Amino acid sequence: MPNKTTRCVLLSTTLDLRDYLAPEIARLDGIVSFVDHLDGSDAADVEMAVGWHPEPDAFTHYPNIKAACSIAAGADSLLHCPSMRDSIDIVRVIEPAQAEMMSGFVIWHAIYHQRRMGTYLQQQRDKVWQRLPQRAAREVPVGILGYGAIGARVASDLSMLGFPVKVWSRTPKMTSAGVAGFHGTDGLDRMLDDTEVLINLLPLTSETRGILNASLFAKLRRGAYLIHVGRGAHMVEHHIFAALDSGQLSGASIDVFPIEPLPADSPFWTHPKILLTPHDACDVTMAAVGGTIRATAEAVQAGLRPRDTVDRVRGY
Ligand code: NAP
């Protein structure tokens, strides 16, 4: 238990964090004192930040911040903030319940493709009574980019439903039963080969930016389906549209975009082969965010490194 309150600034250009975190802010009263913006000498008392897409110069105003918490599993908007300093520990939220939520979301989209639900929705609109050939899950190979906290749960759940599952990570992994593991540059091609449903669960790093491109799509089974729940900048946008228009991709479920909220004139809204959701695949719970903020404040007070920090070298 810290013996004084930790002063923590809320930094976001896209969310009203005070409103978003209201119940946890109340619960942390006496442990963390939250401020919206401080100028002058008071800014030196700020030892911690909670952030989501902060202003580019956000951290320059606070010389003594020791740790910055994301409010989600991904912390790329903090890591890539131009004013972020190497001395600041970046903390992300890890919660097993989030992987469960994501798994349900991804399974729904995989079965939407396997059971041709897009075609049935169109047939209903056209009042067409037409049964389509059925395919068992075992006939629809799934590939997952990323085998971390979330990817591992998604892989094991899809495997239990009968889908053949291959996964790709940076380093070699022990995989669960029914899941074939691949890693590194060579492993990627072997993972993509004959994959029909490709799920992106990678973090955004300098190595993964733009990974969803024409060359990758060309290695999939023709008519493959993309489920993209990573980060918007993983996509080379015009390559997505070209692959959909050529039929190399038969469709795509896309939850994350380079600019969020998605601008009204974006072609993603209207493409007939895209199923779009507003970055809503899975949230962490407020309780988990609050627990992470509390644990980080306690570590800062004790002069220790917080848990669940981003590794700066690997970029996630
Ligand atoms: P994680 O535990 O950090 O796992 C990341 C995985 O990606 C690891 O398996 C890692 O390999 C792999 N990886 C990273 N860089 C790689 C590279 N260059 N080549 C091959 N594999 C690489 O992350 P997580 O908690 O599972 O979350 C994954 C991502 O999902 C987040 O970063 C975010 O982008 C996305 N997400 C989206 C939503 C949403 O609502 N849409 C919600 C939560 C998360 P190693 O195992 O070898 O380290």
Image (spheres, rainbow, N blue to C red):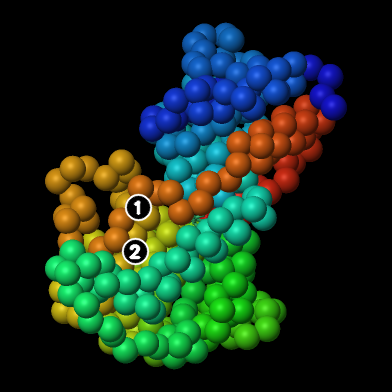
Nearest the camera: 220 or 302?
Answer: 220
Q: Give the position of the N terminus as an image quadrant.
A: top right
* Percent x, y of residue 67: 64, 35
Nearest the camera: 71 or 163?
Answer: 163
Amino acid under disc 1 = Thr
In this image, 119 relative to 90: left or right? left
Q: In the image, which disc is placed on residue 253? A: 2
Nearest the camera: 195 or 216?
Answer: 195
Name which quarter of the figure residue 157 lies in: bottom right
Tell me which residue sits at (60%, 83%) in the image. 179
Tell me which residue sits at (56%, 16%) in the image. 35
At mark 1, the secondary structure is loop
Name which quarter of the figure residue 100 lies in: bottom right
Name which quarter of the figure residue 96 lies in: bottom right
Q: Is residue 182 above or below residue 37?
A: below
Q: In this view, does 69 lie above or below 166?
A: above
In this image, 128 relative to 99: left or right? left
* Percent x, y of residue 309: 65, 47
* Percent x, y of residue 33: 66, 17
* Percent x, y of residue 99: 60, 58
At mark 2, the secondary structure is strand
Q: Do the residues labelled 1 and 2 touch (CB within 8 Å)?
A: yes
Amino acid under disc 2 = Ser
Q: In the image, which disc is placed on residue 310? A: none
In this image, 307 relative to 277: left or right? right
Question: Does label 2 point to a residue whose CB lies under 8 Å from ligand 1?
Answer: no
Q: In the image, which disc is placed on residue 277? A: 1
